[in-house]
Amino acid sequence: MDAQGKTRKVAIACQGGGSHTAFTAGVLKRLLQAEELKQHEVVGLSGTSGGAVCALLAWHNLLRGDAAGAAEALDAFWRDNSATAPHEQIINSWVLWASSLQNFITMPVVSPYYDNYFSVSALEEFKGMLERRVDFAKVGLQPEDSYPVLLVGAVDVLSGEFRAFNSRRDRITSETILASAAIPTLFRSVRPGDGGTYWDGLFSQNPPIRELTDEGPDEIWVVQINPKELQNEPRTVLEIVDRRNELSGNLSLYQELRSIEKVDQLLEEGLLWPGGKYKQIVVRVIELARSRFSRSLGTASKLNRDPRFIEDLMFHGEARAEEFLAALAFEDAWRSRDSEAVAEFFAEDAELVSSAPFPGRGMYKGRARIRSFVTEYLAKELRMDLTRKQVARSGVCWAVRTVRGEEPANRAEGLVEARFLEGKIKALRLGDGTWPG
């Protein structure tokens, strides 16, 4: 809820990324079953490719008020998608081996349109997995007064138009989801019945964000698969191609998020009139942490259907969502300026470091010493800047500022990064944002 005790409206956007999207399923599982989410109303879900699958399963069950059913459907779909049978495990191993081999020798490239039985059978199998979870025959156009709305991203390969299928205007079918997930090097294009010829939505909005603002959310939560940063330079052919695809996939996402942040800043500065066409929307990003999977998140792993790999990604998604929820609670305490409530979020052996441009510079170890910093500085002088997005990656980051007087020249701005363990802060750092991670 917000400061006035009103339920906050949230829209959730799910980026696509092959098997890595199991991370998104884990995030949604935890969020949708959280007690904390009862303080929010989910007004919209969007997704592209694997993200569209996760958004679909959540949307279908949330429309019926069944958050637990959404979690069960996400679990069931990714179990179905795992290579559990012996022949599936053999095929999965061969696909990973063949993908890795392309780093060293030139492999033959087969068009999905010519003598490629796999391109047809795989889409049919995928369609069957969707239809086991959703009775599409009963899915009609969604009434205007029902929530959440569903948006599915795809691109028309002939017209070049980006398309966000909208459950209020377009009947969502299994072909709609296939249109968003048809990777052109593996599958044939999909024609869902509207006259379009669609490829994987990873080439367009990944995921749709702009259209979510039509539902009037107070916040947009983005589950991001493609990393913003890499530690090592891509060198092999596959690594270069994969990073190029990640950057292009992130391009539209960052452009749309930046436009929302710009409107937020103009509203705060009084250059746009609040209460009219525009409203402030807080943006939060939950990103898959590459450092957690440094050895297993290679290029070929986006095709990896090994059950243990899928389970690990889902577990990681649940853990990231848990930290995200703890960060929301910490943020609420900080914004309330209740120094005692803020101090209680720190573990007994926590460490806090404050550096330029912020006050109280130095290191504080243990809750007792941190409490004094919280009382004197953190809850008193420093404010979170929610016109800039909050990012949960290997830790949780906020933009922060201190105001010493009314003039902008007296403001100090930087970042705060918190690392949580079991709902408590283990480490918190304030500074100009140059620290690693």
Image (cartoon, helix red, strand yellow):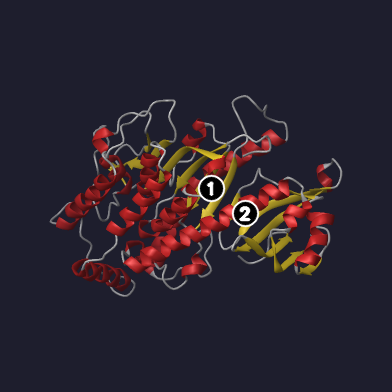
In the rendered image, the residue lying farthest to the left is 115
x, y (%) of residue 206? 43, 47
In the rendered image, the residue lying farthest to the bottom is 104
Q: Is residue 303 visible?
A: yes
Quadrant location of residue 240?
A: bottom left
Residue placed under numbered mark 1 in the picture? 35
Badge 1 or badge 2: first in the primary sequence: 1
Query: Which residue is at 18% across, 57% downward?
Result: 118
- Please tell me which residue lies in front, 155 or 307: 307
Residue placed under numbered mark 2 in the picture? 327
Q: Is residue 355 visible?
A: no
- Please tell me which residue lies in front, 250 or 321: 321
Please tell me the numbered disc located at residue 151: none
Which amino acid type corresponds to the residue marked 1 in the rendered image?
Answer: Glu
Q: Quadrant of the N terminus?
A: top right
Circle 1 or circle 2, nearest the eye: 1
Which amino acid type corresponds to the residue marked 2 in the rendered image?
Answer: Ala
